[in-house]
Structure formats: structure tokens, C-alpha cells
Amino acid sequence: EAQVTQNPRYLITVTGKKLTVTCSQNMNHEYMSWYRQDPGLGLRQIYYSMNVEVTDKGDVPEGYKVSRKEKRNFPLILESPSPNQTSLYFCASSLYGTNVLTFGAGSRLTVL
Amino acid sequence: SQQGEEDPQALSIQEGENATMNCSYKTSINNLQWYRQNSGRGLVHLILIRSNEREKHSGRLRVTLDTSKKSSSLLITASRAADTASYFCATDATSGTYKYIFGTGTRLKVLA
């Protein structure tokens, strides 16, 4: 089944403890992106990647890192999480040129 | 940065009625998309309309785009309880940065 898989789906952590949210897609999509969703703010783009080793900042990149070493994977790294990073995170991918995003099921992160 | 704003923020209708939601954006676009999100889950692509198109249909969905007013509307005809969800518009900048901008969404509730 064509899909975007995120892990973990739920995580409670503490301030400063590094964590990684993984994202993997099996559709050979070139484009991948991370969003966070907060009440009243909609989805805001954190980082995106046009292809392997090509990444760029979205609108809210502060406090996050990404890497794209393989086409299928696009992990989101929080080096030192803070409570304002408590949010619902979505990974999405797209076949270059189609503009249609396929989303993962989401990862709900709570930072205490 | 450009941002989509949906209107209304929330809408409650009876099953069988039509639901209309609107999206406004600020800058020129290549295309505009509509996505649906069931409570806390991943977004699902509904329909894409390009900047040179004025109207598009897909099943019970009808989308219009007015680039002179920088606005779009999504009409769901003969609504069903299963249409209960949040609906988001998303735009991409003409600069080709692949920075998709999502609106804050319209929460639709269809009463059986």
C-alpha cells in the first residue's frame, strides 16, 4: 500500500531530551516535507526537501533539523525540545510536478 | 508570507444540504488545493485547481477559483455525515519554491 509512515505516533518527553521523528514513504517521491499543526494556526511548514541531500527551510524551522540521506526517509530532529514544540506533526511527500501531497497519520508530541 | 484563510471557521448543516467554504490568499499562485482532515488524522487530498482554471468538479465537489480576487470556494453537494471533517486550502507560490501554505481550516459538521 502506498503510504507515508511516521513514528512514533505519540510521544511525551521532557525539555532538552533529543528526539527524532521518523518519516518514510514507499512511493519513490522526490519531495518530502514536515508540518506542525497547532490550534487556530493551521499547518505550518517546518522544512522541506526536493530530493536526496537537498533540504530547505519552511516558515517555522527554528529548533528543528532534518536530513535526507535516502530518498524514502526524511527524519525530523529536535536537538533540544522545548514546551513550545508541543504540537501535532505531519510528514508529507509528493511526486515531483504533481503538487499533490500524501500525508502521514501524524505524530503527537508533548514536551514537558 | 502568503497565507490561506478559510471562511467560515466552523459550519454546521443538516445531511443532504450543500456546504460552501471559502479560501482567500495573498499572493500569486500556480495552483490551489483542498484537503480534508478527519479529527486529528492526516490530511487527504481532495482536488487541485490550476491558476488558469476557473472551475473544477470531482464527484460531489465543486471548486471555483477567482485569481483576480485571490479567492477560492469549495462546494460539497448533498452532504453526508461522513463529510464531517476539517477542510483546508493550500497554495504554492509561483516562485516554484514548493513551500505549500495551508489555511487555518473550516470545521464542517454534518448532522444526520
Image (spheres, coloured by chain):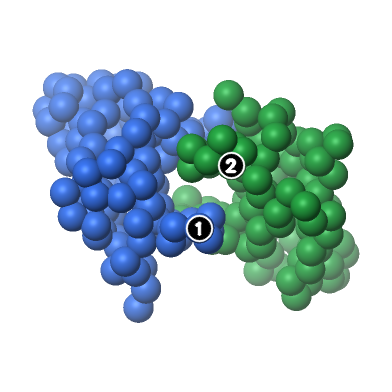
Chain colours: A blue, B green
Q: Chain of mark 1?
A: A
Q: Amino acid at mark 1?
A: Gly
Marks 1/2 in contact by CB < 8 Å: the verdict is: no
Q: Position of residue B108 (x, y in %)?
A: 71, 52
Q: Amino acid at mark 2?
A: Asp
Q: State the SS at label 2.
A: strand
Residue occupying the point 35% across, 56% down: A30
Q: Quadrant of residue A29?
A: bottom left
Q: Nearer the viewer, residue B108 or A77?
A: A77
Q: Position of residue A94 (x, y in %)?
A: 43, 58
Does residue B12 appear left or right of residue A9 in this picture?
right
Q: Quadrant of residue B91?
A: top right
Please tell me the numbered disc located at residue B92. 2
The residue wearing badge 1 is A97
The answer to whether residue A28 of the structure is visible from this angle is yes
Q: Position of residue A90 (x, y in %)?
A: 39, 47
Quarter of the image with the N terminus of chain A is bottom left
Residue lying farthest to the left in this orientation: A17
Q: Position of residue A102 (x, y in %)?
A: 45, 60
Q: Chain of mark 2?
A: B
